[in-house]
Amino acid sequence: MKYNFSEVFRPKFFGLFKKGKYNKQLFVSDLIAGIIVGIIALPLAIAFGIASGVSPQQGLITAIVAGFLISFFGGSNFLIGGPTGAFIVIVAGIVSQYGMQGLIIASIMAGIILVAMGLLKMGGVFKFIPYPIVVGFTSGIAVTIFSTQMKDFFGLTVDVPAGFLPQWGCYLSNLGNINWIEAASSIVCLLLIIVWGRFSKKIPGSLIALIAGTVASVLLDRFGGIHLATIGSKFPELAGGLPLPKPVVPEMSLEVIGNLVSPAFTIAILCAIESLLAAMVADGVTGKHHNANTELIGQGIANIVTPLFGGIPATGAIARTMASINNGGKTPVTGIIHAIVLLLIYLFLMPYAVYIPLSALAAILVMVAYNMSEWRTFKYLLRGDWADVAVLLITFFLTVIVDLTVAIEVGLLLAIVLFVRRVMQTTTIEVLDAEHRVSSSSQEETVNPEDTQYLDIPEGVDVYEINGPFFFGLASRFEEFEDKRRNVKVRIIRMRKVPFIDSTGINNLKNLIDRSHRRGIKVILSGVNEQVRSSLLAFGIDKLVPESSIQPHITPALQKARELLQQ
């Protein structure tokens, strides 16, 4: 089948202006929504930048560059891109271990992986990642974000180590050093976010808390002599304003690239999961449909370009996407306008960001962590099957206690194991022989003679009925039956309900045929569909089973068995 690039990469923005689809009314809706979402994204971009171990301007650069590119090249009408809480843990870990240069290289590598995923049409694959794994990731990340914010939330001035358990050991040993003024500021901002959300959904509580916290910080400093820790005290270089960043290509070597393969893979998987999940949520609310492969390519382009300007990894953000939809956003133009609004703030208002207290940002991130935690869903999933519960808890605790990269790798491995287990439960092998005579029926005119219960199986013949995919998960199932079979002359392997067979399945089938031949048992294949038949012929099964013994369905297969018995 010919590869069609235009089917894989069809950005929604490119199709907006065909045949006069876009009009003034749509632009006004997108403009209003874009301005609101840009303002909403401001405190989050700054907070995510600082929490990730980089500067606030790098968080803003990410929201500007990636926000524009994700909307311009993406496959969703509604997705708003930028830095998100999901990346805080992995970005902070890469920066601490490899520095900013390492983060830039890992982000570019992740972007290349995402583009490759889109080109290989892997967008649909991420829909099959088990829900317990997704919840385990997000809940674990939420707990980690919450843990990292306790230093600024309570105004501690100690150096907090990396790692969940060492962090809490440090916090507990420094309970006497809590700055209660900083803690009070954090608590008030957090309460303001919670209470404001009950009165207004249009303007987010995080923005109100940021403004109120900043005003209070300035007033306390000027009239009360109380100095709260602010962005300015942590990043004094912001006071003079910021120039437009220029693209810088990092120095790469094979050694550095080799060390960053695992973190890059983690970034790519997280980006794909979160962006496609956000796109599906948007589709469910609006009734529209996104192009998953195009979205992956758009996310990849954004993560290749954004680091060159000093940004950090980005993806689609559910909260900002929903804010766009709720405020009337209709097309990707909303995301582009949101990026332009942030660019104007970056150019003209960043000197005022030095007055924002770190306690207010900590309160915003604590609320982000709470919203990410999905604790109700987590609690609900604990009622499920033991395998799902085990996957949920393993993924969660690995994310919190060990490392997000390890959690991603183990989580994907668990997803594969879980999938194989589920398929094995749906695939059965039933063995029938002469004891399964034709069943009587009061409605013989409705009887299908090919139904298992109506087969007339001669003495000396057994039928292996396979129901479901024939793949590596069924490696030793035949051996369970073979030792129990006696006085068999002909064996029919019935494959009418086998949709596909992989190379391991073919190898197991060949081994079964070889063992049968050594015991003097003739083998007949029945009900083989065209796809399975072509796979069998490609691997040379016709050299073990002659063409005359590969029958289209069970009736001629049984007739062939009778002929072989007579011979």
Image (spheres, rainbow, N blue to C red):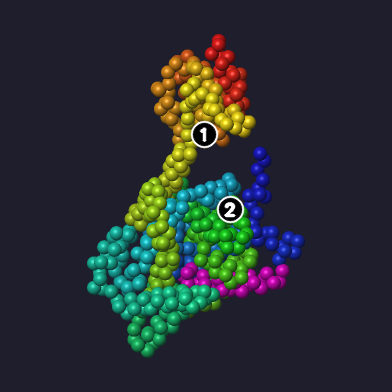
Q: Is residue 535 left or right of residue 254?
A: right
Task: Mark 1: give few (<14), some (14-19) or many (20+) Cα within 10 Å.
Answer: some
How far separated are the C-alphas under marks 2 and 1?
32 Å
Amino acid at circle 1: Asn
Residue positioned 24% across, 67% down in the render: 173
Q: Magenta segment range?
A: 23-46
Among the two numbered marks 2 and 1 on one chain, the one whose residue lies closer to the N terminus: 2
Say which residue appears at 55% left-offset and 10% top-offset: 567
- Percent x, y for residue 159? 30, 66
| Residue 503 appears in view | no
Neighbours of disc 2 within 10 Å: few (<14), some (14-19), many (20+):
many
Judged left or right of residue 513, residue 94 is left
**Helix, strand or loop at mark 2:** helix
Q: Which dot, 2 or 1, sits closer to the camera? A: 1
Q: Nearer the viewer, residue 442 or 354?
A: 442
Q: Does any portion of residue 564 appear in the rendered image?
A: yes
Give SS at disc 1: strand
Residue 226: % across, % down: 34, 84
Instruction: Let me know if residue 41 is in the magenta part.
Output: yes
Q: Position of residue 38 (x, y in %)?
A: 55, 71
Vertical arrangement, residue 567 with respect to residue 376, above or below? above
Residue 367, percent from left and from top: 42, 69
Type of amino acid at the residue the image marks with label 2:
Ala
Quadrant in which residue 152 is drawn: bottom left
In front here: 231 or 156?
156
| Residue at image point 65% right, 59% down | 12
Name which quarter of the figure residue 49 lies in: bottom left
- Residue with the mark numbered 1: 467
Decide whether residue 354 is among the magenta residues: no
Residue labelled with disc 2: 292
